[in-house]
Image (cartoon, helix red, strand yellow):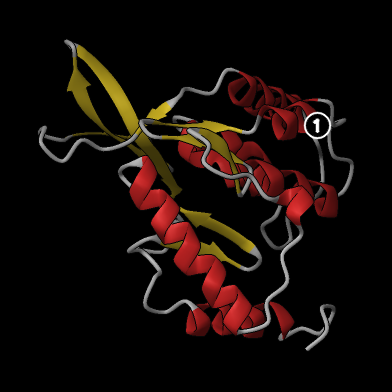
Amino acid sequence: MPFGLCNAPRTFQRCMMAIFHDMIKQTMEVFMNDFSVFGDSFSSCLSHLDTRLQRCDDTNLVLNWEKCHFMVKEGIVLSHKISKNELEVDRAKVDVIAKLPHPTTVKGIRSFLGHVVFYRRFIQDFSKIARPMTHLLEKETPFVFSKSCIDAFETLKKKLTEASILVVPDWNLPFKLMCDASDFTIGAVLGQRKSKHFQPIHYASKTMTGNG
């Protein structure tokens, strides 16, 4: 099935999951044409990689070697910089977002938020900050990109460029969940205390609709 058809991405993902069904979450992860093979040692990672490449050969999957990176301790996966213990934003992507001018249409707001929401796990109180702009997406709301919208736009870009590094959960340590709420949003941060310092694992927030 060629890309461009509305069902192509979903069909391709199902195909990949069928091919690697016995490896997913055990020795590898796959999203569309992005694969990550992992192991807890060099030898195990090499063994998993060999199995995965053999499966590609058996099913006639062709790899672009220029886009492949082997036996690395960190790398960019789905626009995130991932290592053994940490998760960061892809600075190249963030630099592009930081240079965007403020939106002048509803479509522009949707486009900007579509870029930023991809990294919302790194931004504390994301929904609260974005509220002036998301309000403009509601039906029958006049489009007025006010000062509060400009402030929200600039704050989100600033938060992205200063985004915290998120840590990988340590299942041997207790977790701590902290929550907060305002009149229209709720927020939370999940983290752990390591070396006497609280380290965030994931930020979450949600705008309340007020429909009961």
- Figure quadrant of the N terminus: bottom right
Badge 1: residue crowd in 10 Å (few <14, some 14–19, many ≥20): few
What residue appears at the point 69 percent right and 22 percent down from the top-left corner? 151
Where, by quadrant of the figure, is residue 162 drawn? top right
Residue on which disc 1 sits: 96
121 displayed left or right of 147: left
7 displayed left or right of 167: right
Q: Position of residue 149 (x, y in %)?
A: 71, 32
What residue appears at the point 84 percent right and 31 percent down from the top-left corner? 100
Q: Position of residue 63 (x, y in %)?
A: 72, 64
Q: Disc 1 residue type?
A: Val
Residue 176 vs residue 86, the one in the foreground = 86
Q: Position of residue 98 (x, y in %)?
A: 76, 26
Element carrying mark 1: helix
Residue 38 shows in this picture: no
Q: Position of residue 120 (x, y in %)?
A: 53, 40
Above or below, 150 against 112 in this view is above
